[in-house]
Image: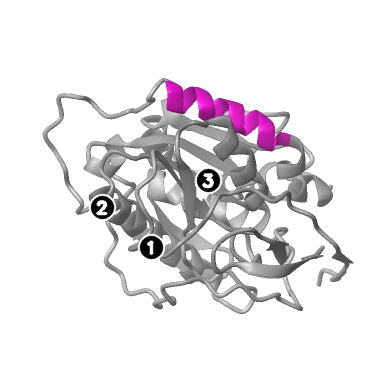
Amino acid sequence: MLALLFILLPLAWASQSITLSSRDESPCTDTHLFLARGLNEDYPGRQGTLVEAICPAISPNSCDYEDILYHSTFEANYCDSIFEGVVNGISQLHAYNKRCPNAQLVVSGYSQGAYVVGDMFAGGGGTFGNCVQGSNEGLDLTSDAGKKVTAVIMWGSRRHTGSQPYNTLSGAEKNGTYPRPVGELETLDKWKSVLIDYCVITDPNCAGGDVNEDHWNYFELYSDKAAEWVKGQVENNATVASNNSESSSVTDIPTQTSTPLPATPTITASGTSTSSESAASTSYPLNLVGLAVAGSLVVCM
């Protein structure tokens, strides 16, 4: 049994003009970010820092974000949470693309959220630890939404697999807790021109390391670097889809039943945790519409 350590730390997040409104009411932007939070984080979690780096970097392009909605708590079944995130994430990409077909799409996931994002593009499913995850196909890269995916970022994923062309940082050659099988890697490789996978060698999740803090501090250290990469992707209108493809399939959305979530994320601080999955609860003081909460950080190990 792993010991739990809870430390409350004040957080500061620079005030910016980026806003998040209801997805059905917000205006279309040039670039739209989707964020999959880490385990036990409040929306948007540590990746709020990433948004604050990316959106100014790609100015004068308009930019906003939405959270991929899924239950990401220690109480939830881990495999069910992953599958729910995959289902909702793919559906949200298709929905936004249908409403805003010209927007470039950027997808980022941290910790458990990186697992979700990886499965959104590689496909997923199987037995992991003591739970069974529903199977899904990856997003069709020739679908309308797939053609607009400009950047995909994964941070500290338990499914990190060593020696892939999109891996970066010191853990690039290492395997995470659940490295991907050949079939999923072949699918993910099709996205390599828009994909980057961050992992440091001391990260317990993605590289079998033993420094929890190195899993928690990606966004303090690498948000600006990631923002520069996204800027290049946006400026080059990066895409993996063939311009000659006539397919606009949306049949890649998994159909297994998942527990519905409220339309708007509830931002509440989480007080306890019971797992070594490293992304602890966070809440940020945001200058975002409908998301103003006091900031704190709960560290679990």
Per the picture, the main secondary structure of the magenta-coloured stretch is helix
Find disc 3 in the rendering and name its residue. Answer: 108
Crowd tier of the residue under label 3, counting other residues whose Cα lies within 10 Å: few below 14, some 14–19, many 20 or above: many
Q: Residue at x 39, y 25 (%)?
A: 238
Mark 3 is on which residue type? Answer: Ser
Which circle's residue, 3 or 2, is located before the other in the chain?
A: 2
CB under 8 Å between discs 3 and 2: no
Magenta span: 222-235
Q: Residue at x 73, y 29 (%)?
A: 170
Q: Quadrant of the C terminus?
A: bottom right
**Residue 188 visible somewhere in the drawing:** yes
- Residue 50 sits above or below residue 231 on the image: below
Here the colouring is: one colour
Find disc 1 in the rendering and name its residue. Answer: 88
Q: Is residue 283 magenta?
A: no
Find residue 99 and name its label.
2
Find residue 127 and name its label.
none
Residue 133 at x, y = what percent? 44, 65
Q: Quadrant of residue 55?
A: top right
- Residue 47 sits above or below residue 76 on the image: above
Residue 70 at x, y = what percent? 48, 68
| CA distance separating discs 3 and 2 | 20 Å
Label 2 or label 1, whichever lies nearer to me, is 2
Front position in the image: 77 or 107:
107
| CA distance separating discs 1 and 3 | 14 Å
Query: Element type at marker 3?
Result: strand
